[in-house]
């Protein structure tokens, strides 16, 4: 396929969502190609998988920068050096400056392990269990400056079982994340949607947004 959108994946650790995106992009008909994987942690596990798949990787260690602004500038120039058109944050655990977020407005997406706007921030699984929630899940959204907020592209809903621990629930959500993230990136990369105001709307026929995938027990 010509005109596949060059995508930069940002990680901080394990990189299982990154793996799902890399695998999806191995299909030549997938509308995005992975131009680079960038980690802010030198020992992020995900880097090894990316390298083994022949994908270019970079480490931009946030500890080497005196300020958030300096780190974000280095990140921005690396992304531009790799001609990145879309950024996919995949477990990238850094708060970004408004300057960076605005520079990539509607071209940067993120996955979060909850049905946003519920449970922004850390420990979403523990908090869902503590609330006695019966439904939980994951969300892919365009990135805005407020953490874990922005126009929603796709959500995966999973049931919360009475027997769940934070670990079993996290695993069910993670499996669902691996299904929706490649779908959401494909929608963005193929131009099947656009952001109007703070809503995602379909520009291609037959696409209903946000994509909601219920995952049954
Ligand atoms: C995923 O569950 C992702 O949704 C979450 O971090 C995990 C990373 O796992 N992201 C956030 O919490 C962002 N606010 P992975 O490295 O195996 O993809």
Image: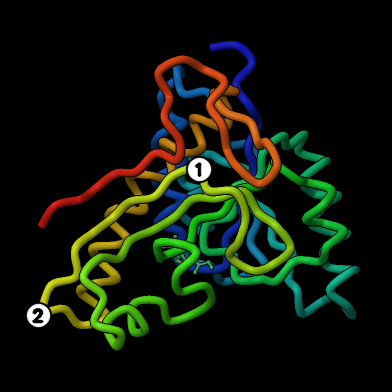
Residue 124 point in image, percent of width and height:
41, 76
Q: Is mark 1 within 8 Å of ligand 1?
A: no
* Above or below, comparing residue 100 to residue 199 in the picture: below
Residue 111 point in image, percent of width and height:
49, 56
Q: Earlier in the sequence, mark 1 or mark 2?
A: 1
Residue 159 point in image, percent of width and height:
19, 63
Label 2 crowd (10 A; few <14 / some 14-19 / many >=20): few
Q: Which residue is mark 2?
A: 163
In the rendered structure, find residue 93 and report the number of the disc placed on it: none
Q: Residue at x 29, y 44 (%)?
A: 213
For label 2, the SS is loop
Q: Residue at x 81, y 66 (%)?
A: 97
Q: Residue at x 60, y 23 (%)?
A: 191
As drawn, the residue found furthest toward the bottom would be 130
Coloring scheme used: rainbow
Task: Judge from the rendering whether residue 8 lies leftward or rightward of residue 139; answer left or right.
Answer: right
* Above or below, comparing residue 34 to residue 58 in the picture: above
**How many marks overall?**
2
Q: Which residue is mark 1?
A: 153
As rendered, which of 203 and 186 lies closer to the eye?
203
Q: Residue at x 57, y 21 (%)?
A: 203
As rendered, which of 159 and 178 lies closer to the eye?
159
Task: Judge from the rendering whether residue 156 lies leftward or rightward of residue 49; answer left or right.
Answer: left
């Amino acid at each position: 396929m010509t005109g596949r959108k060059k995508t930069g994946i940002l990680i901080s650790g394990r990189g299982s969502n990154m793996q799902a995106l890399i695998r999806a992009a191995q299909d030549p008909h997938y509308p995005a190609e992975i131009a680079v994987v960038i980690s802010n942690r030198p020992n992020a596990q995900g880097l090894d998988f990316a390298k083994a798949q022949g994908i270019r990787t970079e480490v931009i260690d946030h500890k080497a920068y005196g300020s958030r602004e300096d780190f974000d500038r280095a990140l921005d120039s690396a992304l531009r050096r790799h001609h990145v058109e879309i950024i996919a944050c995949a477990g990238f655990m850094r708060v970004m400056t408004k300057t960076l977020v605005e520079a990539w407005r509607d071209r940067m997406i993120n996955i979060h392990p909850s049905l946003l706007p519920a449970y922004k921030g850390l420990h979403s699984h523990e908090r869902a269990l503590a609330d006695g929630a019966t439904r939980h899940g994951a969300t892919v959204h365009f990135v805005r400056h407020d953490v874990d907020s922005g126009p929603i592209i796709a959500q995966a809903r999973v049931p919360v079982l009475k027997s769940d621990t934070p670990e079993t629930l996290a695993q069910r959500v993670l499996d669902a994340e691996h299904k929706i993230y490649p779908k959401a990136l494909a929608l963005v990369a193929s131009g099947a949607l656009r952001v109007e105001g703070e809503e995602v709307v379909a520009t291609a026929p037959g696409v209903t947004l946000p994509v909601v995938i219920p995952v049954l027990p």
